Amino acid sequence: MFPIITRWRISLNEPPAILPWGYSIATGQSQDISMDFGTELKHTIRRMYDAAALKPEGLLSRVQLNRGRELLVDLGYQQSDLDLLPEYIIKSAFPCGNPLPIIRDIHPKAILDLGCGSCLDIGILATEQNQKKQIIVGVDFSRELLSIGSRFIAFLPASHIQLLAADLTALPFSGPYFDCINLNGSFNVIYDKATFLKQISALLHPDGHVLINDLLLVEKLPAGFADEIVNWTWNVAGALPPEELGKIAREANLSMVHLHEHEQLAPICRGEILLRKGNDQTVDGENGTLKY
């Protein structure tokens, strides 16, 4: 039995708000006291995604770029997977990559999806027959995005899915419970990544995995760029060079399994990073090298 969350209630310091269909979405408490940069960033991200969730045209509606089904197919999502979801989830999703092949390959029994948004990845996993015994917990800053995903999740015959609106850096869990922690486009909006990786590493079973799809830094950012909140909101200012990411991962007792660059648009590239708990030396693929 999950030690914190049950199907109908999420235990936090504040009483949870019960949605009409019986699912609990509670708001986590930030540990920050003053409105420092990290705290302001959290508030900004929450407000931005809450507002985007309420727009029929979805996130970044004024920007001319691929979105919806076209974006997801470009990122490698299979049409057969997308056909499992209602169009309102597809329209509101804005991931950085497709984590599903890796998640399916490692066969986790308990998944924590941090920054799950409107439940794109959770929704697909929840519909798969071979995933019925998995426990899936989705957490996001935005209550509005979670409400979109809940409309679909609530009608699935699954008692193993939990959704929680909370601060990703102040999670109400303790002790190792999860086999896989997924961050699809949410890692770079975390201000103190070194502390964050240590916190989520403590939630993993031995040999559990952290899977990150986000932007990586391949060139230096302009001076002062990372001092502006707005530059963090689209994941650019929070991007790390691969070497720095590897360093803070090792400090969190996480080893690099692979790091793949999918495409570059200097000074950043879109990448997939798979980490495993434990500081043993690990490599990517048959050639025995990390892919930078």
Image (cartoon, helix red, strand yellow):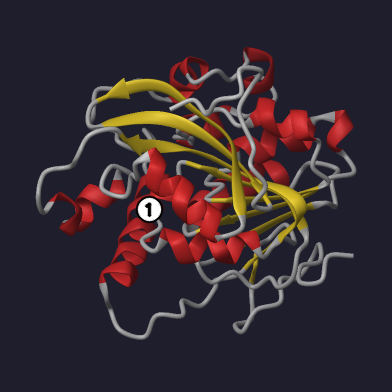
Assign the C terminus to one quadrant of the image.
top left
Identify the residue at image location x=32%, y=68%: 38
**Foreground: 108 or 256?**
256
44 left or right, relative to 278: left
Indicate the position of residue 150 as horizontal and vertical percent values.
64, 49
Instruction: Examine the rendered structure and indicate whether residue 169 appears above or below residue 158.
Output: below
Identify the residue at image location x=63%, y=59%: 201
Indicate the position of residue 125 as horizontal and vertical percent values.
73, 35
234 left or right, relative to 172: left
Kindly identify which residue carries mark 1. 189
Q: Is residue 134 visible?
A: yes
Identify the residue at image location x=47%, y=34%: 95
**Foreground: 209 or 58?**
209
Assign the N terminus to one quadrant of the image.
bottom right
Q: Is residue 186 visible?
A: no
The type of residue carrying mark 1 is Val
Identify the residue at image location x=34%, y=28%: 269
Indicate the position of residue 193 as horizontal and vertical percent values.
43, 59
193 left or right, relative to 208: left
- Count of picture labels: 1
**Foreground: 79 or 152?**
79
198 left or right, relative to 71: right
Q: Quadrant of residue 6?
A: bottom right
Mark 1 nearby-residue class (10 Å; few <14, some 14–19, many ≥20): many
Indicate the position of residue 12 as horizontal and vertical percent values.
65, 79
Q: Quadrant of residue 289?
A: top right
Instruction: Examine the rendered structure and indicate whether residue 78 appears above or below residue 188.
Output: above
Element under disc 1: helix
